[in-house]
Amino acid sequence: MSATNLAKGHLLWYIPDGYIPPESSGQLESHESICVLNCNAEETQIYVTVFFEDRPPIERIEVKLEGRRTKHIRTSGLEKDGEHIPKGVPYAMEVESTLPVIVQYSRLDATQPANALMSVIGYPIS
């Protein structure tokens, strides 16, 4: 089977650790991003559900991603019906897609003079 016949990615991904620091130092602002790669020729719909420790989730925030493109979605910019992810609050995310995609999660921690960058692949569900 050639690589062109293989499914590239998954429809459902989980990111269990999210946290946007309330303060940053220096020139850069702390932030987190969901990085999504769509290898398909067609556009896909992405739906992000944000879970919290002490309140109901923000359900199915919709993001469109064109075919054969990548998108870096800042979690601080996710919003639905006036709700957004507040700074200084732990959260987790479910990322659904109408087509198989690859999901990576990145965090820039600029709370100290020495910045830290972390990036991991999300947890895919087959």
Image: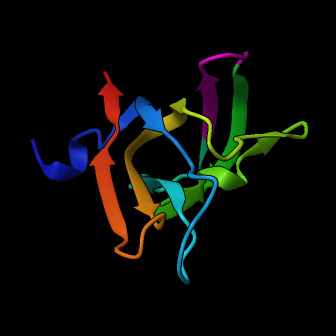
Left or right, 92 with reference to 55: left
- Residue 13 vs 117, above or below: the answer is above
In which quadrant is the N terminus drawn? top left
- Colouring scheme applied when the structure was drawn: rainbow
Q: Please, what is the dominant secondary structure of the magenta stretch?
A: strand
Drawn side of residue 80 relative to residue 78, left or right: right
Taking the view exactly as shown, the residue that stands out farthest to the bottom is 27
- Residue at 41 percent across and 44 percent down: it is 101
**Magenta residues, start to end:** 46-56
In this view of the protein, which residue sits in the foreground, 119 or 62? Answer: 119
Residue 98: percent from left, percent from top: 55, 34
Q: Is residue 81 above or below residue 12?
A: below
Q: Quick one: 68 or 71, which is closer to the camera? A: 71
- Side of 58 relative to 8 (left or right): right
Which picture quadrant has residue 66? bottom right
Residue 120 position within the rendered picture, expressed as x and y whole percent measured from the top left: 29, 48
